[in-house]
Image (cartoon, rainbow, N blue to C red):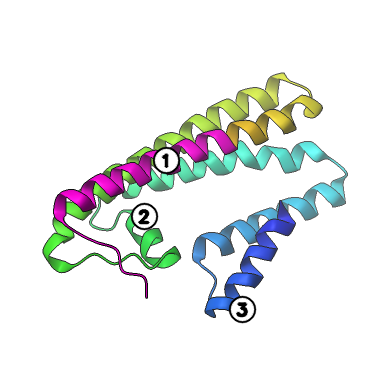
Amino acid sequence: MLGAIWFTAIVRKLVTGSVPGLVTISLIVLTVQTLAAIITGNLWIFLLHFPLANLGLCLLFTRTARTHSPIAARLAAEVIGLRTPPVHRQRMHSFFQHVTLLWGGVFLVLAVVLGVLLATVPVTTYIPVWAVTTITLIGLGIGVSTLRLRSVTRSLGIGFRFA
């Protein structure tokens, strides 16, 4: 996983000249956790950060959901360059508030499930269940977010232009 994050950051830097904040944060956290696990020889230290990180993301997303700048809107602008036309900004703001809450919920479910699993099952069971659970919940979140975005943009008559 650490290699995948480093690869993503390097490719993004080479292709676009910048690395999104979320990728940078992931890179730092995973690097520190990996080093801590290697130095201590304790895999549990590395695995503990997954439920804790998801809880932190849940708090971050839910804290910003009702503000003038929901984190989902900032990430959409930073990661994929999604910009909202001024005439549709209010309706899209509502979309971003709702999708930010959705992701807060996804991260809360992940934190709880992964925390319970880490406390109750052996590491050999935890790792594959962690992978399937994370991929499934993130995939569902992406699917719901995409369908909702498509619905909102269609109702507003907004098209996408790739530049």
Q: Are marks 3 and 2 in contact (CB under 8 Å)?
A: no
Res. 120 image quadrant: top right
Picture quarter with the C terminus: bottom left
Residue type at mark 2 is Ile
- Residue under label 3, please give it: 14
Q: Residue 106 at x, y = what percent?
A: 45, 36
The answer to which of marks 2 and 1 sits earlier in the sequence is 2
- Please report the bounds of the magenta region as a residue range: 135-163
Residue type at mark 3 is Leu
Q: Nearer the viewer, residue 101 or 16?
A: 16
Q: Is 32 on the left-hand or right-hand side of 162?
A: right
Q: Residue 66: in sight, yes or no? A: no
Whether residue 85 is situated above or below residue 14 in the rendered picture? above
The answer to which of marks 1 and 3 sits earlier in the sequence is 3
Q: CA distance from mark 1 to mark 3?
A: 29 Å
Q: Residues within 10 Å of mark 1 (few under 14, many from 20)?
A: few
Query: Which of the numbered marks, if any, corresponds to residue 143?
Result: 1
Tell us which disc is closer to us: 3 or 2: 3
Majority SS type along the magenta span: helix
